[in-house]
Amino acid sequence: MTYQVTIQPSGHTYSCEDDESILNAALREGFNLPYGCRNGACGSCKGKLLSGDVEHRGSATALSDTDKSAGKILFCVAHPLGDVSIECREIGAARDIQIRTMPCRVQRLEKLAGDVMLVQLRLPASERLQFLPGQYIDILLRDGQRRSFSIANPPHDDGLTQLHIRHVPGGLFTDQVFSSLKEKDILRIEGPHGNFFLREDSSKPVLFIAGGTGFAPVQSMLAHAIQHHHDRQFTLYWGARNRAGLYLDQTARRWADEQPNITYVPVLSEASPDDAWQGRTGLATEALAADLTDLSSYQVYACGAPAMVEAARTLCLSRGLPEDEFFSDAFSFQSGG
Ligand SMILES: Cc1cc2nc3c(=O)[nH]c(=O)nc-3n(C[C@H](O)[C@H](O)[C@H](O)COP(=O)(O)OP(=O)(O)OC[C@H]3O[C@@H](n4cnc5c(N)ncnc54)[C@H](O)[C@@H]3O)c2cc1C
Ligand code: FES
């Protein structure tokens, strides 16, 4: 059976299958309700049932007797028994999400290129990390320093937290990632952080400009957009030195092949003869400059080395992009921080 859920005060509605919790169906439909553990333990998803009936499937330990008599339910384990109306604050901005610190276990390490490691992190069984697509986490090192990495998975696929980590030779943390870090090791993370996330209240065509592992947050945003059937136009300029630097080239090509609203422009700056590269050459920003002269109706997301982000910003503003439609994460260094 399929039931209708209405969220108040926004008036948003979505459908929920009877084998889905109210929270899971909302996330599937692209509505950001708050959550923490997703298993009835933390209370982050607590809200009021305004009308209709639900059944809590699984434990609802975060619900006190007072909560119950006030009509509160836990959306992560509550399943509708008919059409329901709920009262809940929807997350529309990064400040609405609680920043948390937690340990996590390295589940898998896979080299995506000679200098790029896919690191998959498993959170404790009772925890989930809520975030907006494009945000990042900090890895907390033993001596109090921290290192930032963008979350590469989309929010709906949050079983494992994925990072794309580029090796900075001589770097305190990334040297460890490429030499001694192993599966089952424990890291401490803090997040989510940042204002670099997909603005879903806009219908403007989007330009992504990614350099190297700047692809990580773009993957999160594009996978999110595909999942939620956004029909905005998305164009990705992904710049790297050589073919290996486009470490998930096949993923990006598949998106562009399968989704009529996604265009992918890979650009190499130092392709070698071995790359047998037939595509665009130079810098990603140069390719963009050659393709588009008027950016006044666009929204731009740029991510990667600080110099690339600065070049993208200068270019876009000079081509008429309104300043408040430019979003970026510059991969600056945190050494000594
Ligand atoms: C918001 C944000 C998100 C980020 N997301 C990602 C991501 O998804 N993937 C990713 O690979 N990186 C990302 N970075 C960059 C990443 O945080 C750094 O590369 C990392 O902190 C390096 O740590 P380290 O301990 O190995 O090097 P450190 O010990 O801090 O640095 C050693 C030396 O290497 C140089 N150095 C450090 N970092 C870089 C760098 N990025 N480029 C060139 N030289 C450097 C510095 O001169 C420094 O003195 C992000 C940075 C920020 C601020
Ligand atoms: S998300 Fe923790 S109780 Fe629902």
Image (cartoon, grey):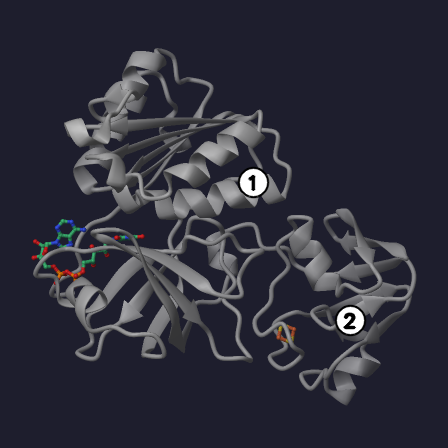
Where residue 193 appears, x then y in whole percent? 38, 58
Q: Residues within 10 Å of mark 1 (few under 14, many from 20)?
A: some
Where residue 79 appears, x then y in whole percent? 81, 68
Does residue 318 appear anywhere in the picture?
no
76 and 44: which one is in front? 76
Quadrant in which residue 111 is drawn: bottom left
In this view, 67 is above or below 85:
below
| Viewer-side label of 1, 2 | 1
Where residue 276 appears, x then y in whole percent? 24, 26
Looking at marks 1 and 2 on the same chain, the residue that comes earlier in the sequence is marked by 2
Q: Amino acid at mark 1?
A: Ala
Quadrant in which residue 99 is drawn: bottom left
Q: How many marks?
A: 2
Does residue 19 appear anywhere in the picture?
yes
The residue beneath circle 1 is: 225
Q: Is mark 1 within 8 Å of ligand 1?
A: no
Between the C-alphas of marks 1 and 2, the distance is 26 Å
Q: Name the side, left or right, on which 208 lies relative to 225.
A: left
Ligand 1 in which quarter: bottom left
253 and 211: which one is in front? 253
Which residue is at 57% across, 28% downward?
232
Which residue is at 80% across, 56% downward?
16
In this view, 161 is above or below 210:
below
Q: Name the side, left or right, on which 217 lies relative to 27.
A: left
Where residue 321 appears, x then y in whole percent? 37, 22
Please tell me whether mark 1 sits on a helix, a strand or a loop: helix
Which residue is at 63% across, 42% downward?
228
Q: Residues within 10 Å of mark 2 (few under 14, many from 20)?
A: many
In this view, 306 is above or below 312:
below
The residue beneath circle 2 is: 78
Q: Amino acid at mark 2?
A: Ala
Please tell me whether mark 2 sits on a helix, a strand or a loop: strand
